[in-house]
Image (cartoon, helix red, strand yellow):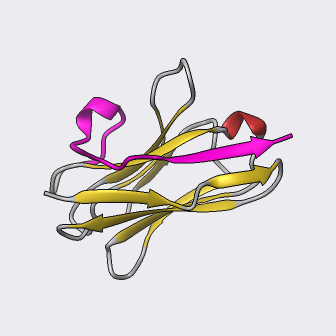
């Protein structure tokens, strides 16, 4: 079992940057595919970035590609989401999620087994 806690959200002006963190307890994330999703009111929870458990593959949605980077820290307990050139349409609750160990990364929320509680990102125009 792994518990996930997101942090780093907040209010930022358009064009600014934020770095979100997803910190695990219970075990490391080194053997799990990890993803970041976001959800705004009235919308589905959408995948925006993921990283394979090996760390050698990443995925970015079209809406954030070129502005966002997902990475792991060397201790493998934290996964980061660096977000640059933020836009008002990036405003949402951001969630990290992990799969069970040694399984390929996935692209839908239902395929992830562990979730954090979310952190709010608000981008003002």
Q: Residue at x 23, y 70 (%)?
A: 28
Viewer can see residue 35: yes
Q: Residue at x 74, y 48 (%)?
A: 86
Is 101 displayed left or right of 19 in the figure? left
**Camera-nearest residue between 108 and 17:** 17
In the image, which residues are magenta? 104-125
In magenta stretch: residue 74 = no
Whether 93 is drawn above or below 25: the answer is above
In magenta stretch: residue 115 = yes
**Residue 117 percent location from the top left of the image:** 38, 47
**Residue 40 percent location from the top left of the image:** 57, 29
Is 40 displayed left or right of 12 in the figure? left
Quarter of the image with the C terminus is: top right
Q: How many marks?
A: 0
Q: Residue at x 63, y 47 (%)?
A: 121
**Residue 106 percent location from the top left of the image:** 31, 40
Query: Quarter of the image holding residue 1?
Result: bottom left
**Camera-nearest residue between 65 and 111:** 111
Viewer can see residue 67: no
């Amino acid at each position: 079992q792994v518990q996930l806690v997101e942090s780093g959200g907040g209010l930022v002006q358009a064009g600014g940057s934020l770095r979100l963190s997803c910190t695990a307890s219970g075990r490391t994330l080194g053997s799990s595919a990890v993803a970041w999703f976001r959800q705004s009111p009235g919308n589905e929870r959408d995948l925006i970035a993921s990283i394979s458990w090996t760390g050698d593959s990443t995925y970015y949605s079209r809406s954030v590609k070129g502005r966002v980077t997902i990475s792991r820290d060397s201790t493998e307990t934290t996964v980061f989401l660096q977000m640059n050139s933020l836009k008002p349409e990036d405003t949402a609750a951001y969630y990290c999620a992990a799969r069970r160990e040694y399984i390929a990364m996935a692209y839908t929320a239902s395929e992830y087994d562990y979730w954090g509680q979310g952190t709010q990102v608000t981008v003002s125009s």
